[in-house]
Image: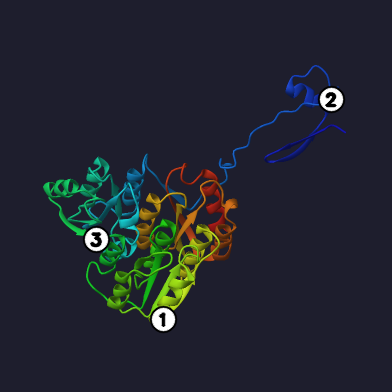
Amino acid sequence: GGVRIQGTTGTVTVSGDKFRSTLGLRSTLITEIRQNVAVDPCAGTGAPTSGVSRHAGASRVETAVEVSKANWPQGGSEDVLLATSQNFPDALASASLAAALDAPLLLTPTSSLAPAVEGELARLGAKTVWILGGTAAVSAGVEEELGDLGYDTRRVRGGNRFETARAIALAPEARQVGTVALGMDQDWPSAATAGALATLPERIPTLLVHTDAVPEVTETTLAELGAREVILVGGTGAISADVDQRLRDLGYQVRRLAGDSRYSTSSAVAGEVLAKLPAGQRTLVVATGNDFPDALAAGALAARLDGPMLLSPQCTLGDSPATSDFLTANKARLDKAALVGGRAALSDRVMEQVAAGIGG
């Protein structure tokens, strides 16, 4: 009956003689040959990735620069947002300001201006650098260096992360909005995912809350913005039912966009964004759900491209059925995708799976 050989591309049956000669065996009388081969579930299979681009650098700082280079032309942005690459709180609410200014978000170490960032500011023809957070986030020395290079600087800051989120929501100028998103201050996926709502035409801002309480400054800012509806991003483990009830007691309509993980919550928000964007195909922006820096740059990119942003597992979409389900449900609306981050952030397997998803 020959020898049946199973491989990654299918199954074939060959004669005993063919099998013997191919493997250089002395006889067709074989009891057993066994070899355990470790299969890397994250490795690409060589499947096509048409329509999917990857923006990545050697570090989180350089990845944000690559996002800017690929999506903003030379001399294409007088405004640039700058945040620390070392921690997330002061940039969690940045997406609405990036959307308002049509500006990229760059990252730099707290105490020094990264050379790659200096080069990108020059390429963009930047005039104003909006520094997110106080000097503990981006130092006074960095601000002075920017001034010496001829840039105007505007520091958007408050005494804490809640006040900084307020300052960002009211920048570049105070405005009235109907809807505000709330993210949990200690949980970057909640707040970064909330920022994806800034892609919508009304540029929904993000404010921050504790898991179990609404800070006074957040309550005050909701009133300043004239909000009528509040969207809670994340389950009750991120933003509790007590916060929900407090907001209802204050007279707000409250909705919750959430799933059982950061990925399913991100999928819920992406679905909301896609449903409310004008008709037509969109570019999906994808960032890892494992660390914050790429997601911050991705939020600004999603606003630039008027498309949804999605957090993804690093290795395979099989680790997040909600992400695969989002692609399946929305393939008619997605014609391209932009991955933010290198293979250590989003594997080649993820890239192939996203390509297959948007390609139907």
Mark nearer the N terminus (1 vs 3): 3
Q: Can residue 176 be seen in this view?
A: no
Outermost right residue: 1
Q: Position of residue 2 (x, y in %)?
A: 84, 32
330 left or right of 164 in image: right
Q: Do the residues labelled 1 and 3 touch (CB within 8 Å)?
A: no
Image quarter where the C terminus lies is: bottom right
**Residue 274 image point, x, y percent:** 47, 68
Q: How far is the residue under mark 3 from the one under mark 2?
A: 74 Å
The numbered disc on residue 31 is: 2
At a point 47% along the width and 58% down the height, the residue shown is 310
In this rendering, position of residue 291 left or right of residue 23: left
On the image, the x and y values in percent for residue 84 come to 29, 49
Label 1 vs 2, first from the N-terminus: 2
Q: Nearer the viewer, residue 279 or 127?
A: 127
* Cα separation between marks 1 and 2: 76 Å
Please name whichever residue, 245 or 9, is drawn nearer the observer in this view of the structure: 245
Q: Measure the alpha-carbon separation of dots 1 and 3.
A: 27 Å
Where disc 2 sits, the SS reads loop
Left or right? Give the position of 135 relative to 193: left
Mark toward the start of the polypeptide (3 vs 2): 2
Please give the residue where the numbered disc 3 appears in the rendered image: 159
What amino acid is labelled 2 in the image? Thr
